Image (spheres, rainbow, N blue to C red):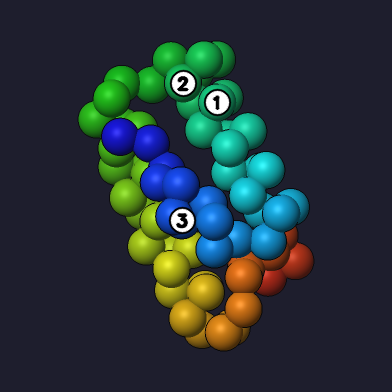
Amino acid sequence: MTIKQDTIAICAPDLAKTLQDWQDYLIHEKNVSKHTLRAYSADVTHFITFLHLHYAKPPSLNDLS
């Protein structure tokens, strides 16, 4: 399981690109297990959904700082 496209879609472009790059890094460079990727993806999905509801706008990298 990877980060769902509907989660990426509710992010600002800068955060969407960063999430995709991070996911690629986990898969191709860190070679994490499918279980680790599923757990990380679920956690990120819940957090991004929370930010989207909390700020009532697409979350960006700036919202994470």
Which quadrant would residue 63 be assigned to in this image?
bottom right
Q: Position of residue 20 (x, y in %)?
A: 58, 37
Residue under numbered circle 3: 7
Three-letter residue code for mark 1: Asp
Q: Are marks 2 and 1 in contact (CB under 8 Å)?
A: yes
Residue depicted at 49% across the width and 26% down the height: 26
Apparent side of residue 33 relative to residue 49 in the rendered image (left or right): left
Question: Who is closer to the viewer here, 61 or 5?
Answer: 5
Q: Position of residue 21 (x, y in %)?
A: 63, 33
Q: Distance between the Cα atoms at labels 3 and 2?
A: 18 Å
Mark 3 Cα shell of 10 Å, populated few (<14), some (14-19), many (≥20):
some
Q: Distance between the Cα atoms at labels 1 and 3?
A: 16 Å
Residue under numbered circle 1: 24
Residue under numbered circle 2: 27
Residue depicted at 58% across the width and 44% down the height: 19
Mark 1 Cα shell of 10 Å, populated few (<14), some (14-19), many (≥20):
some
Q: Are marks 3 and 2 in contact (CB under 8 Å)?
A: no
Examine the rendering and report whether any part of residue 64 can be seen: no
- At mark 3, the secondary structure is helix
